[in-house]
Image: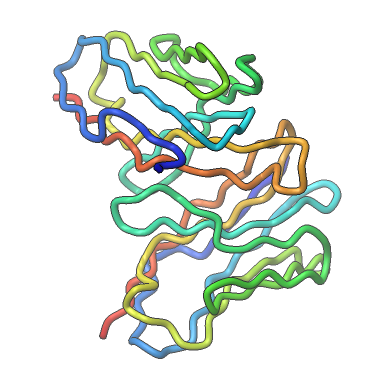
Amino acid sequence: GNSVTQMEGPVTLSEEAFLTINCTYTATGYPSLFWYVQYPGEGLQLLLKATKADDKGSNKGFEATYRKETTSFHLEKGSVQVSDSAVYFCALGGSNYQLIWGAGTKLIIKP
Amino acid sequence: DTAVSQTPKYLVTQMGNDKSIKCEQNLGHDTMYWYKQDSKKFLKIMFSYNNKELIINETVPNRFSPKSPDKAHLNLHINSLELGDSAVYFCASSQVGTGDSYEQYFGPGTRLTVT
């Protein structure tokens, strides 16, 4: 069945460091891929998405490229801020409009 | 003008009690969801309703019963609460059948603590 695997956290970085959070998936066909972010004490919100191979999603300085050759959708940001501290979830679109979620990766940015 | 709201935000109760969590969305979406998030932040889909009809019913104890009186509301009733039910419960909504079918809008969560 469809599944999503994310790198384990927490990931701890200093402000202005480069961020990569790895995400790989297993799926039949070419599902849409998503990154959601959960700030402390809040619900999840969509950060970015890509709907087909080689698409790049971007938002708030974050980017992720849909790579079907490596079945990956890694999240990157060139220079992180303390305000980026959150839990990041990779997900893919499944049947019945259900999202298949990764386990989440906690990101901690130190000033 | 909150998009997806849940009440209560915090719920502390004893084992064996029955409790309900309410969810309302004002986005005009036709699909609503309940998720359970455990202490390690793992997110599990519990139920999904589309136009008031149940479309996803994951392996969840019978003690959990969703109810959708209309498209804008999805409530969750839990009978005979157990310690393992302690978690954060999120309601979410989306509009399926469009290019944004998978964009789900989440409520702020209800932190349930069973003692």
| Quarter of the image with the N terminus of chain B in it | top left
Q: Residue furthest bottom?
A: A16
User: In the drawing, does residue B82 fall left or right of residue A58?
Assistant: left
Q: Which image quadrant for residue A47?
A: bottom right
The residue depicted at 56 percent of the width and 75 percent of the height is A62
Image location of residue B13, percent across then percent down: 16, 21
Image location of residue B33, percent across then percent down: 53, 30
State whether residue A76 is above or below residue B83.
below
Image location of residue A28, percent across then percent down: 82, 46
Closer-to-camera residue (B27/A34): B27
User: In the drawing, does residue A76 fall left or right of residue A86?
Assistant: right
Image location of residue B20, percent across then percent down: 31, 16
State whether residue B77 is above or below residue A10.
above
The residue depicted at 45 percent of the width and 63 percent of the height is A8
| Quarter of the image with the C terminus of chain B in it | top left
Q: Residue furthest front?
A: B1
Closer-to-camera residue (A100/B29): B29
Closer-to-camera residue (B41/B70): B70
The residue depicted at 37 percent of the width and 64 percent of the height is A86
